[in-house]
Image (cartoon, grey):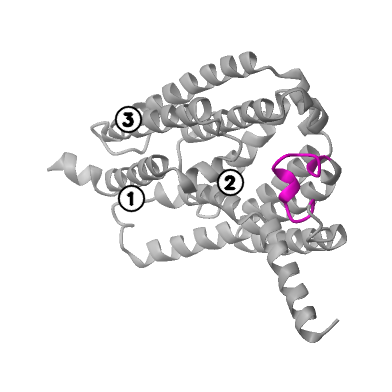
Amino acid sequence: MTNIEKKSAGLSLLLGLVKALRPKQWTKNVLLYAGFLFTLNKKWFLFQPSMWQALLQATLAVIVFTALASGIYLINDVTDLSQDRLHPTKRHRPIAAGHVPPWLAVVMTVLLEAVGLWGAFKLSSSFGWVGLSYVLIQLAYTYSLKHMVIIDVFVLASGFVLRAVSGVLVLSADISPWLYIVTFLGALFLGLCKRRHELSLLAEDAGRHRKSLSHYSTELLDQMISIVTASTIMAYSLYTFSAQGLPPGHLMMLTIPYVLYGMLRYLYLVHMHKLGGSPEEILLRDRPILAVLLMWAVTAAAILAYGRTLVAS
């Protein structure tokens, strides 16, 4: 093999490894900024040096959690190697396609988890323990829990909650428990839509790819999604006008339409465009979803930062 061929092979391996880390799924880790967002309701905090320090801490936490999650993605792909090779879309993943050797993925998993946990404990001991809990739960999911009906989507939802909790702990922020409930329900909604998409895509072969899918039906999942959709909207609405620490005047209620539209738009994409298998793909590609998320973030930040001033005036 010539030097050029060696360099080309090395570059191909590097690109495959980066792709195996699933960069698109790193968008989930934006949840760690929730703790930072909800510190904006402290009048003294806005645009003070402490705000930039908190933003730095939150960003470091995002990087740490990205390492932990990426390591889990690698070991999950190694474990599911045989099933992924038969899957219509997952067979293109670098490990299943043979672009990244399984032994290298395992080595990278160990390195990423070690570095990630070290970084988590350096930032905050409580954040470190949550990070360790996330790794253990995800490993249990990879080797066992993903085959258990209903439990599988609960575990997926727990990953989102642990992200939100991590963002709070690393800043020692004070956030209403309502947001944890909303995060869990919203993540459960995404997980159920994901299962529905998998069931529709794989049809009669669904059970061969994932055991839990043989216990689901489209009708059952539609009922579950309806229940969780209504529960999420209700929980978020209750949060906006009953949670402690929010600006007076119930101004956060102005963000309810964003949540309602976002969920209805997602259901539209699931039912009419047969999407839902990759929430991160929808987030990155569907402009209305992206726009409403940005509008929610800007509106919520403005209310939390200036809500008390507006009501007082």
**In front of the other: label 2 or label 1?**
2
Frontmost residue, 201 versus 219: 201
> From the image, which quarter does the C terminus lie in?
top left
Q: Which is the main secondary structure of the residues drawn in magenta?
A: loop
Instruction: Report the disc number at residue 185.
Output: none
The 10 Å Cα crowd at callout 3, few under 14, some 14 to 19, many 20 or more, is some
What residue does disc 3 label?
257
Q: Is residue 94 visible?
A: yes
Q: Please identify the residue farthest to the bottom as the structure is shown.
A: 3
| Residue at left offset 36%, top offset 38% | 245
CA separation in Å, label 2 and label 1:
22 Å
Which residue type does callout 2 highlight? Arg
What residue does disc 1 label?
42
Judge left or right: residue 232 versus residue 250: right
- Expressed as whole percent of the image width and height from the top left, the position of residue 164 reads 54, 44
Judge left or right: residue 192 versus residue 108: left
Frontmost residue, 61 versus 188: 188
CA separation in Å, label 1 and label 3:
25 Å
Query: Bounds of the magenta span?
Result: 83-96
Which residue type does callout 3 highlight? Pro
Q: Secondary structure at mark 1?
A: loop
Instruction: Report the disc number at residue 163.
Output: 2
Q: Does residue 151 lie above or below 312 as drawn? A: above
Which residue type does callout 1 highlight? Lys
Say if the magenta span includes residue 79: no
Q: Quadrant of residue 22?
A: bottom right
Frontmost residue, 130 versus 86: 86
| Residue at left offset 79%, top offset 51% | 96
Judge left or right: residue 94 versus residue 144: left
